[in-house]
Image (cartoon, rainbow, N blue to C red):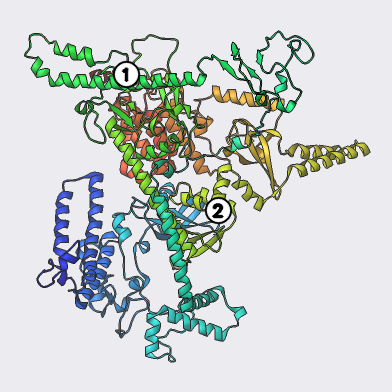
Amino acid sequence: GPAEPFLFPVDPHTNPGYYDMLIRPMCLREAGRRLQAAAKEYSKLDGDAAVRFEEAKVAEFARNIRLIVRNTLSYANAGPMVVSAGGEMLRIFERLLLDWVLAPEDKLPPLTMLDDDLCVEVHPTDLESTVLLCDGCEGNYNITRLDPPLREIPKGDWYCPRCISGRWWGDLDPRIGKSIPVDGVTGKITKCLYAKPEENKAATFVYEVRTADGETKILPLEKIDAGLHESGQAVPRIRFLEAVTESLGYSSGIDHGYRPDVVPVIINPNVSDGAAQVVLSSSVFRDLIATSATLMINDTEEMTASEWLRLLTLLLMKCSSSDLVQSVASEMETEAAENMAKAVESSAKISDFTQALPEPPFDDQQDDTDMDVEEQNVDIGEFEQGPESNGDSNGKNTGEPKPAAVGRPESNGNDAAAPMVVEANAVEVAPMDIESSKADIAFVEADTANSAEDELKKKRALVLAGKVARMKSREDGVAAFCIKNQLRSTVASFEQDCVSQVVESTLAPKEPGLSFAQTRCRGVMCDFCGLPDTALGSPLLRVPNEKEWDELIQHATRSRRTDLVADLRDHDQHATLNKSRNKKLMKISVRVGDDLISAEPDESYFTDLTDGGMLEFLPRNPDGFQDELLFRYDSNLPFISGSMTGHEGCAVAAHNARKIKVVEKFKENEALVAEREAGITCGRTLELGIDSAGRSYWHFNTDLDSLFVCKPCPMGNSKWRKYSEPEAISSIIVSLGKDPIVPELKRTFPAAANLIRNGTWSELLLKRHYKLNSFANTLDATAEHSVEKESAEGENTEDNDVSDEQSSEDVDELFREGQTVFVESKCRKMLWTAMVIGIAKHKKDTIYRVKYQGWGSRFDEWVPSQRVVRYSDDNKKVQEEMLEDAISGNGDLPSTLESLEAKSFLKAKDRLRGHGPLPDFNRIACTPPNASSNKKVFAIMKAALIAIEAALPIGSVDNTEKGAWRSDLASQWRLKVLQSEGPWDLMRLVLALEESISEEWIRPDLGHLRSGLPGRAKALEEASSSSLAIRIILLDRSLLYNYVDKKRYKSLKSKK
């Protein structure tokens, strides 16, 4: 068969240079050997590890087979017979891999039918009928069962329907044709598409979903599966996803030269055999013939856009082949190359890593720029008061002493030459011989105290020295322990241990909070070198990981603070036995979305610190962390913390390595930018990048203000979109979120980036679709309306009562720009004070753009008129009452959860959560007014699950440091409940809570009902809103909330 040349390794004697030319030689024997070794290792695994191992090895085996074929093409002396055999073997392998391994389980043939000599679609009549061999996939087909059936064997090459259509996973996916909910409407899954993998991520699939309103959306595989689970149409996960995305399937892309707009050349009697062969092999020749025929038959005014495009493409190809165009293009390319070399050379000279850092998010001072800054010029004459003018402007004595003024004894009457007045206390004037030309200058010698700036510098130097001394004390404590540990065996032979006392008195710190017990981290290793603190004699510190470092360095190098300190100390009790164990201070950071927020630049806060305080680490030991954080808090010194652990030397080395990496990455990006800009100037435009959905973004030299977006289509005809307005480009950048292409788009289109910074892009977009009322027009309309109303009242006061009331209502509904109003929250439970800054009308609806009092401009939004309430004293009282209700009702359950058993125990004593505040259950259960009924029910179930966990008594779950419900895992569980988007996500969390609760806290009379529920795998597979509701209600009814056992896990804590 075709696999025979590839069974064994290539003989180097018969194929010289083979192993010198190929880096990774491969044969079927080696691929099989690796597969057998993987099977032995697979037998030792189970669970998820076995599944992941199996998927990885299947993908690796497929790559090895494809590598064999690629090697035949790379080796020059392989010969046509070997190359042809390799191509045939690959086509057979891809067919069998798809049909026998990668296909869905319900479409896999049984093991007894895995015989390639049988037909691809086995049928009992195959033994009596003629079987035809496909020239593409080498599969057998019964000619009587084809569609349409064949009566005789065709002449020449024949390709099966699967090869012609390019059969692949998308034709077998069980998700195709199913309906799922998409943003409140129903959508039908119509197509499966391959998604290009992002950096450091595996390839996957996306799906085209057509909604009921005719819109087409592209959704990832994860959302498709979640939607199917939510709608109760769960499908099995894709086995071997990595191998499926790499599978080529059947022989796709076979070009027979058929075109829908012309007669097929093979059956056209007017086309010779030679011309037919050229047509089949050259697409340019086909386009040229088709364009010539179009020009001969049709008038130019009747030509379609596709015909014009084809004509222009051919003309461009003809013109570009001329010598003149080639000469001009060469000059442009040479000039562009020189400019690119200069740009790359200038970027290569960058050595300071701060120049390579991106701007931090929300780095705009729009609130500051809107303020009017006035310069006050002080008139010197105001200070030159006589002895009788020591009072206010009315001649009254204010009783304030007048500061002594030193100046010229006499005035020469020339105001322009008036001397500068110097005011000081205890100033001595030194008489000097001054020339007449310099008579307007007074020399003053004064003994002044140290300035405030000098005092601050001295204080700063003292606290920095104290910080260094504290760090040295901790290092000395660790060193003392290491020395005593090394001398332990020697000292044991002495009659009296004086060495340890000397080491202890010399090195061990005496200050509170710096002892070895508050420095050492027992059992913790450095994440960089893998050694404990005692191995190097250096305490372990909290170090940011690479992601945290990337966020912090942008702010720190610009003298911006990113961390706040919450003081949780009990100032009323200064002395407690367990004071060292109680948390005193907490580090807090503020985020808007995923972006870290920092304060205004403060140079004094980062004075005399390296890299903006990025090396000011805090101890890993909890007690030492609290003590050092308290010192930094009291001394107004910056600090850095993180999720990693490391010695100071390791942390500094990692910091320096990350700085080098930032500079190198910046230089690479600048080189790419220079290449792209140079390509634009010489007509060789490169794409700005590709987003996660596969769309490419372009910027052409002929239209520098426009963004072009290319959306690829499965049929090969890409769709292009052009966006010229800055606000439209801003909307695209905002919609991309955190996509890697966003920084490049902001750099290329600075006007759009500025609109995003000041938050005006949405307003400009709305102005294109709505008719906006200006402030002047609104006032004019109100004035005219009031005049008409007064005249109508003067003419007839009785007959027009109804019309007067309607007019009054119209006036009440109209809010002006600049008017203060109340805005009702989406949950209808709060009133917020705001100011109207914009008005828009669309048909009969009116919307208002409001700026909330005390909030930045980034929180401005458009709200419907139904949520805008007039500002009045009565409504202000309503606002206060609603605020009081919200504060007093925090922790109360919504009315729909009144029957929950956990409600009675939320505020009871001895709860597992401790004395922490209860979450706002009403806010968790709150949904937008236009939300579907499924989303409303889902939000209520999330609030119920959070309430059950908040009411758990002490002892019901293991919340020790290594328990299944320790504090960090419990916090993650609550966060995932709030972020869950479908029944499958929430069912997984319900099962986790059920498995963590001890059986002693389950009512015996209801325990048998829980045992009848589906198991974990089946519950996740069949997760739906109804199954979730049953499980949550049964969990609430079966729990013993009033049973408390404080000693259940106390023994475990005491051992530690």
User: What amino acid type is highlighted by mark number 2?
Assistant: Ile
Tell us which disc is closer to us: 1 or 2. Answer: 2
How many numbered circles are shown? 2
Left or right position of 144 against 358: left
**Which residue does the numbered mark 1 point to in the structure image?**
1045
Q: Is residue 724 above or below residue 312?
A: above
The residue under the point 72% across, 20% down is 382
Left or right position of 79 against 800: left
Residue 906 in view, yes or no:
no
Where is residue 127? Give x, y as percent. Answer: 22, 76
Q: Are marks 1 and 2 in contact (CB under 8 Å)?
A: no
**Which residue does the numbered mark 2 point to in the structure image?**
729
User: What amino acid type is highlighted by mark number 1?
Assistant: Asp
Where is residue 1052? Give x, y as percent. Answer: 25, 21
Q: Is residue 309 above or below residue 745?
A: below
CA gap, disc 1 and disc 2: 61 Å
Where is residue 647? Give x, y as percent. Answer: 27, 30
The residue under the point 61% across, 26% down is 882
When asked about the image quadrant of residue 885, the answer is top right
The residue under the point 43% across, 19% down is 458
- 10 Å crowding of disc 1: few (<14), some (14-19), many (20+): few
Q: Nearer the viewer, residue 379 or 341?
A: 379
Quadrant containing the N terminus in the rendered view? bottom left
Where is residue 405? Give x, y as percent. Answer: 66, 15
| Secondary structure state at the residue bearing disc 1 | loop
Q: Nearer the viewer, residue 522 or 318?
A: 318
